[in-house]
Image: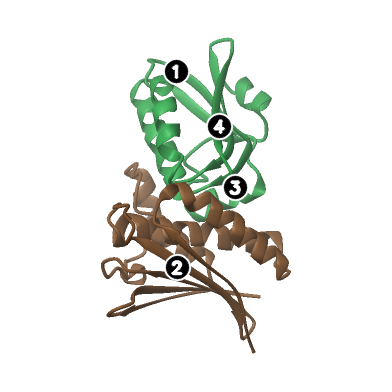
Amino acid sequence: MASFNFSSSKSGDITIVKLSGELDAHSAPEFEKKITPIVSESGAKVVIDFSSLDYIATAGLGALMASATTIKNNNGKMVLAGMSDKIKKVFQVMGFINVFQIFSSVDEAVKSF
Amino acid sequence: MRRKLITIVLPAEKEHLAKIRKTLKEVSSDIGLDDDKIADIEFAVDEAITNIMDHAYKGIVNENNIIIIRMEIKNNKFIIKIIDRGEKFDPTKYPKPDLERHVKEHKTHGLGIFAMLSFMDNVIHKYRRGTGNILILEKNI
């Protein structure tokens, strides 16, 4: 069945988190568990790469919101990149489109820091 | 004219959500729906079923907690009927959340119902003693 994968890499002092597969109510706890140490670091700089993510549920949106709150509280910054039109529509309808800075590509997102 | 498509019975466990979405997408594609409508239905049904697991069954996983999903076409509508035996739970009775406030207050839960109602053309809830909750999601085709 469709799986979820979370991987991260570094571009200088920026952490690029790549999400693949489907972020639903089943995989959201795994996302939270893995993103929390990253966004909890003081002054963290994070790009979430959506280019390989096929699906996001509101559980995923909630986990992203929690991460955004944590990183802000730790004086860091998190931006999103590479969203498909399908996922962008979910963000738009659910009112999240203006909550995050969203870039077309990871390169653009990295340059924003 | 009514055309029954498929019936799925599964345990109310979140690991099965992906399986349901996959089947739903296949059936939607087979009946000729476009990608936008398929995506809408996938999202709404996934949210509906997640809500059932969380609220009607209170997150309890056991052999009695099952979900029945029936798909059919009737009167130019793709109809997905979701039946559970859990506590009476009518998602259509929940007020629409103030999205701006929800986001401003950094709330991380409570959008599933709104999601379901936003992506389908019609949502009806019934409760029958002996059967349980019957949630009917309709998408015009």
Q: Which chain letter goes with mark 3? A: A
Furthest residue to the top?
A12
Residue behind mark 2: B68
- Crowding around mark 4 (Cα neighbors within 10 Å: few <14, some 14 to 19, many 20+) is some
Amino acid type at mark 1: Ala
Mark found first going from the N terminus, 1 or 4: 4
Q: Kindly indicate which chain is depicted in green in the rendered structure.
A: A
Label 2 amino acid? Ile
Give, as a three-letter code, the residue at label 3.
Answer: Lys
Q: Are marks 2 and 1 on the same chain?
A: no
Which disc number belongs to residue A44? 1
The verdict on a common chain for dots 2 and 3 is: no
Rendered image: mark on residue A88: 3
Residue occupied by mark 4: A5
**Depicted B122 relative to depicted A95: above or below:** below
For the residues labelled 2 and 1, the Cα–Cα distance comes to 45 Å
